[in-house]
Amino acid sequence: MARDYYGILGVPKNASDQEIKRAYRKLARELHPDVNPSEDAQHKFSEVTTAYEVLSDPQKRKIVDLGGDPMDNGAGRGGGADPFAGFGGLGDIMDAFFGAAAGGGRGRGPRSRVQPGSDALIRLSLSLEECATGVDKEIAVDTAILCDRCRGAGTAEGGSVTTCDTCNGQGEIQSVQRSFLGQVVTARPCPVCRGFGEVITDPCQQCGGDGRVRARRNVTAKIPPGVGDGMRIRLSGQGEVGAGGGPAGDLYVEIDEEPHDVFVRQGNDLHCHLRIPMTSAALGAVVPLETLIDGEQEIDIEPGTQPNTELVLTGKGMPRLRSSGRVDGRGDLHVHVEVVVPTKLDDEQSGLLRELAQLRGEEAPMLAGNGTKHGGLFSKLRAKSR
């Protein structure tokens, strides 16, 4: 006789998926072995879980509505159910045909309560100076850490871990179905022990039996010279602690390089603009320049320096950080010269400039040549248009 799955959950046959889910959650909280340790509650919890698994599956629910039982041995033959329903993948099918069905059952066994932790990621803002010189930064991270009360065991003081009575420590429950291929045995995780094969009778009140808790803590990140925007620094074992106090994953620190007021970074090179008066451009000068990490450097301005002249200070850029973590030399500092032309002159200054123009024999402004005689840009464009 088919079981009344709707009655087990206490919902009508026309209940929506959300109503079924709410009913299951309510009953599961009341009957969970960690809350209600009675044997009757464990049995009912298993029934409630099975009922929810059936009614939350559209195909299995259809079989129930037609008067069948998808969990019954004859459902595959009489109810028209999919003979492969309930398989998680090829491994389950191979277990069914060549393991359990052929030789009396070959389950995968209980899974370990101790699991490795996952990695964590955090962004860290650094100034351009800090990226250039390297720095030790103390940063606050929010991750799962080992429960200091149970030390990862998940049990309260004096508590114990017992073999699950529902699955007899196997961590899974097997069910037999008959199909046109013969008898098929499928296995699903035990709903009582969640596949662990054992039950914590008195879970730790601090972590709820998980063996870990979330906490905010400080870690020190050693940032090497030459890091750049988007680079990631790996801190081994500083990520999330795994369930059951399992080994922690890694913490990745992603660099967020802040813009600088003076210097612009392009790869390992730095660029800046130097403004000089027109007299220094014409006569030449020695100009002090404050670099990013090398202090003050003297820049030689050659007489007759033109606007937009680019001066290169070799080896005064950013450190070249290799993938191995080793620094291999430095980039260059590119200084772009801007010549400042005065906008306001008094009579004396204007007179001196006119006198200079006469002494130099400077003519009135005129258009520059278009390079026709030398095959310049305009002559090439003109030739292409013919």
Image (cartoon, grey):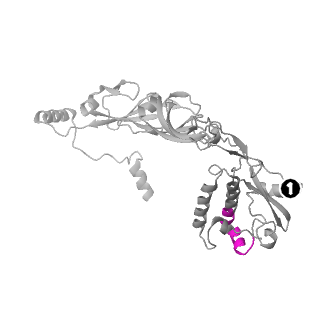
Q: Name the residue at 34% across, 27% down.
A: 289
Q: Is the magenta region chiefly helix, strand or loop? A: helix
Q: Which residue is mark 1?
A: 98
Q: Is residue 51 above or below residue 199?
A: below
Q: Which quadrant of the rendered structure holds the C terminus?
A: bottom left
* Residue at the image point whose x is 66% and y is 63% from the top: 52
For this rendering, which residue is in front, 384 or 19?
Answer: 19
Closer to the camera in the image, 83 or 31: 31
Q: Residue at x 67, y 44 (%)?
A: 201
Report the span colored magenta: 51-68
Please say whether residue 66 is one of the residues in the magenta stretch: yes
Quadrant where the N terminus is found in the figure: bottom right
Left or right for 148, reference 133: right
Q: Secondary structure at mark 1?
A: helix
**Image spot of residue 163 (x, y percent):** 74, 45
Question: In the rendering, at what x and y percent does residue 329 appear?
Answer: 51, 27
Q: Residue furthest bottom?
A: 66
Task: Kindly identify the amino acid type of the residue bearing the numbered disc 1.
Answer: Phe
